[in-house]
Amino acid sequence: MRGMRTRRMRLGASVITLSALMLSAVACASDDEGGDPPAAGNSAGASGQIKEGLSVAFLPKQVNNPYFTVSDNGGKSAVEEFKGEYKEVGPSEASASSQVSYINTLTQQGSDVIVISANDPNAICGAVNQARQGGAKVVTFDSDTNKDCRDLFVNQVTAEGIAENQVKLISDQIGGAGKIAILSATANATNQNAWIELMKTELKKPEYSKIELVTVAYGDDKDEKSFQETQGLLSSYPDLKGIISPTTVGVAAAARYLSGSQYKGKVALTGLGTPNQMREFVKDGTVKNFALWSPADLGYLAAYAGAALASGMITGKEGEKFTAGKLGEYTIGTDGVVVLGPPTVFDASNIDQFNF
Amino acid sequence: MRKRLGSWDVLVIVVLAIVVVVSSVAVEGFATSRFWGFLLLDVIPIALIALPMTLVVITGEIDLSVASVLGLSSAVMGQLWMSGVPLPLILPIILLLGMVLGAVNGLFVTGFGLPSLAVTIGTLALYRGLAYVVLGDKAVADFPFSWTGNMIEALPGTTVPWVALVVAVLAVIFGIVLHATPIGRALFAMGNNDQAATFSGISVAKTKFWLFVLTATIASLAGFFWTMRYASARADNGAGLELSVVAAVLLGGVSIFGGRGTLVGVMAGVLLLITLRNALQLADVPADTLTIVTGTLLIISVVGPNAAAMLRARLRRRRPAVSPAAGG
């Protein structure tokens, strides 16, 4: 019996040691963070400066997602500029409710600014409102929550901006005349359909009267399907002049098909893609140019918007203006929306300056 | 009761106490009523589903479909609410749905004699798939605040959510049934030896069937709470939650092979898992590290009790040879 008890105690001791080890890791982590952020200076007036020492937390849809790594790093460089304390926290899975406990944690830590891309517009609403009651300013970016639940939404681009940009790019590439097709994602993708409708409206303008949109194909945001759909488009419409693919998966697959076919350099292709995906196709002459917003600028702008709110320079009302460092001045639109601006166009001259 | 508390459950309670004490000192914001209010809200769905899961695992079975049942219930709630069904009517409907989903699990396991691990991995995928059929990738959110707000309301003068109290009462009932009634003894008997239990007059198949029904019904109830708490009915609600539930049950000292465990240990396991996770989160430990901690705990909880049992068995075998006095 005594032996048994000793064994039990030994097992107990080892488990306790293990948990103590894990806890000492906790203690270290909290020491590094060093408790409360330094007290911010006296409250600045409406026209004042961004306070120093603001704690700004970025909460992406998911950590370790390349898109958010780039946009959050944009936020980090902004926070460093205005001498705040940057931090990125978030779930490892982008599920609807996974962000809530992180918002709760930030509420307890007394964050001054929470910059969040919502996995679900409603699931985070209650938690975000608690954070705001606790004194935090909440800015959504990339993906919004209900407008009542946050102070500002930093939108990457308007749907109109996308439509104008895409039609302009293809028109320039095909010399303003000829048949074009659209390669979309899924047939019920809300944003894609909104863009396509606006592109159709845009094409009715007199300067595009010689361009004919012959069909919309759906690649379902799958690489292989998009590849096959591109092939299908070119065999159905031998005189096709150009393709617009406003989805990163579609445009890359279409470029891959064109680059290995007789149509390379003859059929124009543009769309929304990332520089890393499209670099080789721009360099081999398959694609002249394409567009996307800069995720880094998006995070940068969101950080400045949050800091301006937390410093009392703006309140989130329509028409208020603030300056976002190197990006210049922005004006708040209806429903507390700030638009980053027209998409960035990438071509052979500038593509090597971007890495995302 | 003392006899039923094995060394492992006591250990889990001790570790929980240590975690609480150390975190109170080391992690700023931990020792606040607000932290515990948030924590209890996070605990509710896991604790709720862990109750019937404990019984299932004690009988030597497992139900991995619980999180998908939660998701399907949430999706159906959303669809019903969109078509104008009032919430007081939706609740019984989805509980009925839970019973049906559980009956399907139970039928495959007891009727066709298939292993519950295989069956419920199948229904894990099937029910989640159905959830997407019902609601697609839409989210239904326009539930009235009188429901969504009240569901997370704290007891007057505290930060303790009232639902946590309901779960606590249920835990006491489950504890009494498991540890102080013939039903509970039958469950342990089944986990130790199915055939022996059958010969001693326990109807194993029937009991297990109803356990699967009970588990899915409670998972549906958790789905109702989940949907109200996050004010969002979605097909992907609760995805991956089954792992947290199983981790908590095993961490609480229930043997994965059945026949051993206590409900006190499981509730301590649930609290330990969530407290550790939230404390680490509060200390700004990244999400990936949290996953590693959860995984490590799961391994310890599976290996630990069995290693201890093996040590004990070896000790017993060896003792007569080492110490002749033990015989007398």
Image (tube, helix red, strand yellow):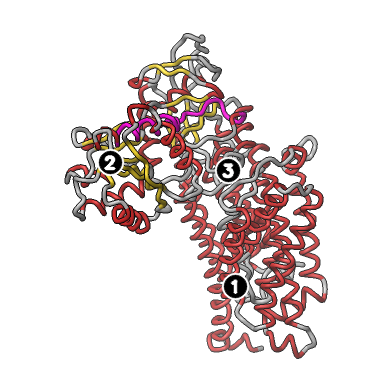
Q: Residue A349, labelled with which disc?
A: none
Taking the image as drawn, is residue B11 in sight? no
Which residues are the magenta region?
A148-170
Q: Pointer 3: residues within 10 angstroms few (<14), some, or many (20+)?
A: many
Q: Position of residue B263 (x, y in %)?
A: 71, 64
Q: Secondary structure at mark 2?
A: helix
Q: Residue furthest bottom?
A: B199
| A153 magenta-colored | yes
Left/right placement of residue B274 relative to residue B215 reads left
- The three-letter amino acid code for the residue at tag 2 is Pro
Q: Residue A275, labelled with which disc?
A: 2
List the residue tagged with mark 3. Answer: A101
To which chain does the residue with label 2 belong? A
Residue at screen point 58% across, 53% down: B136
Q: Secondary structure at mark 3?
A: helix
To which chain does the residue with label 1 belong? B
